[in-house]
Amino acid sequence: MAENKDEITVSKSKTGFYYSFLTIVLLFCLIQIGFGAILNISKTISYRGKISILTKIRDHAEAQNHELKENIKLFSSTSSLEGIARNNLKMAGEDEVLILINNNQPQPTSKKKFKRKKHKK
């Protein structure tokens, strides 16, 4: 009977150690799963923020591209080219006379002092 009690206590301690080990392994797995879930959620939030920023940049670039295309159409027409030539390049048409008016301020005249040489007498 004594041997039987010793065997029971040894088997109980073995099963207790086994269950304790399994509990620790399961807790470790739960911690890993929780950490992975938190990491995935934070990455998802970060990526959604980046996607919204990139969407705004893309929309701005598309609007600017559309505006530039409109400007190309405007500048490629003959009348706008004539306007650019008249205003910026100071050109005139065939039957026109070009008159330029300068509104420059007069240059201030600087008074020069001449040194007189002394003559010996």
Image (tube, helix red, strand yellow):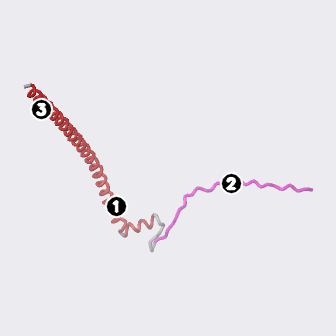
Residue 25: which quarter of the image?
top left
Kindly report which numbered mark, 2 or 1, lies closer to the viewer in this rendering. 1
Q: Secondary structure at mark 1?
A: helix
Above or below, 84 relative to 51: below
Q: Is residue 24 magenta?
A: no
Instruction: Name the residue tied to disc 2.
Output: 110
Image quarter in which the N terminus is found:
top left
Residue kind at label 3, given as amino acid type: Ser
Residue 6: give x, y in percent of width and height.
12, 27
Front one among 84 and 39 = 39
Instruction: Name the residue tied to disc 1.
Output: 68
Residue 76: give x, y in percent of width and height.
36, 68
* Left or right relative to 23: residue 89: right
Q: Secondary structure at mark 2?
A: loop
* Left or right relative to 106: residue 7: left
| Furthest residue toward left | 1
The residue segment tinted magenta is: 96-121
Residue kind at label 1, given as amino acid type: Leu
Instruction: Name the residue tied to disc 3.
Output: 11
Q: Which residue shows up at 13% across the image and 33% down it?
A: 15
